[in-house]
Image (cartoon, grey):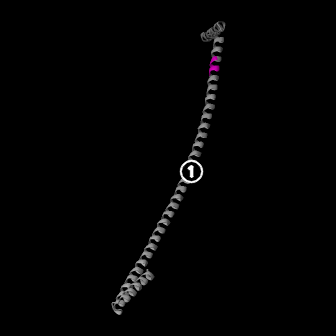
Amino acid sequence: MSDMELAELWVAVAFFVFVGILLYNGVHKALAKALDARGARIAAELDEARRLKEEAQKLVAEYKRKQREAEAEAEAIVTAAKAEAERLAAETKAKLEEFVSRRTRMAEDKIAQAEHQALADVKAFAADAAVQAAERILAASVPGTATGDRLLGQAIQDVRGKLN
């Protein structure tokens, strides 16, 4: 055997002796225990990650539900606001129409009253003018007798009563 082969043989022997010492001292058990512990820790971390993922999915679902509820509530508020605005617009329109109608009626009443008053004033003026004219005519045609004055006064009263 050559030196090279001999060196390889001693390396192999040393390796097997080293492994034997490790096995004798129970290093393989400690190594297996460490690997098992690491596997358990990884499994626990995976379980925790799975639990966190499920929790996150629940939170996402809850937030989506809340978002849908908020959108529905916002839509309901907008719909209610539109309905309220339409109701107020209709109410305002009705009040405005009623106000305009009332003001028109009041104006028409004032016009009718003014027409009636003007007609009464014209009649009164005409009656006064007729009475004055009748007084002048009768005074000129009937000379100053007591019977004539009495008849004249009575005629004037009759004319006033009929014209007013």
For mark 1, give the secondary structure.
helix
Could you say which is closer to the camera, residue 107 or residue 68? 107
Residue 100 in the image, given as x and y percentages of width and height: 48, 65
* Disc 1: which residue: 80
Figure quadrant of residue 30: top right
Residue 63 in the image, given as x and y percentages of width and height: 59, 38
Magenta stretch: includes residue 60? no
Give the residue furthest to the bottom.
141
Residue 134 in the image, given as x and y percentages of width and height: 38, 88
Magenta stretch, residue numbers: 37-41
Residue 75 in the image, given as x and y percentages of width and height: 57, 48
Could you say which is closer to the camera, residue 79 or residue 85? 85
Q: Residues within 10 Å of mark 1 (few under 14, many from 20)?
A: few
- Write the residue at 61% across / 29% down: 52
Q: In this view, does 126 lie above or below 97?
A: below
Q: Is residue 86 left or right of residue 27?
A: left
Magenta stretch secondary structure, dominant: helix
Check the picture and name the quadrant holding the C terminus: bottom left
Check the picture and name the quadrant holding the N terminus: top right
Q: In this view, does 111 lie to the left or right of 12?
A: left
Magenta stretch: includes residue 38? yes
- Write the residue at 40% across / 79% down: 124
Figure quadrant of residue 23: top right
Could you say which is closer to the camera, residue 51 or residue 146? 146
Name the amino acid type tagged 1: Ala
- Write the residue at 56% across / 54% down: 83
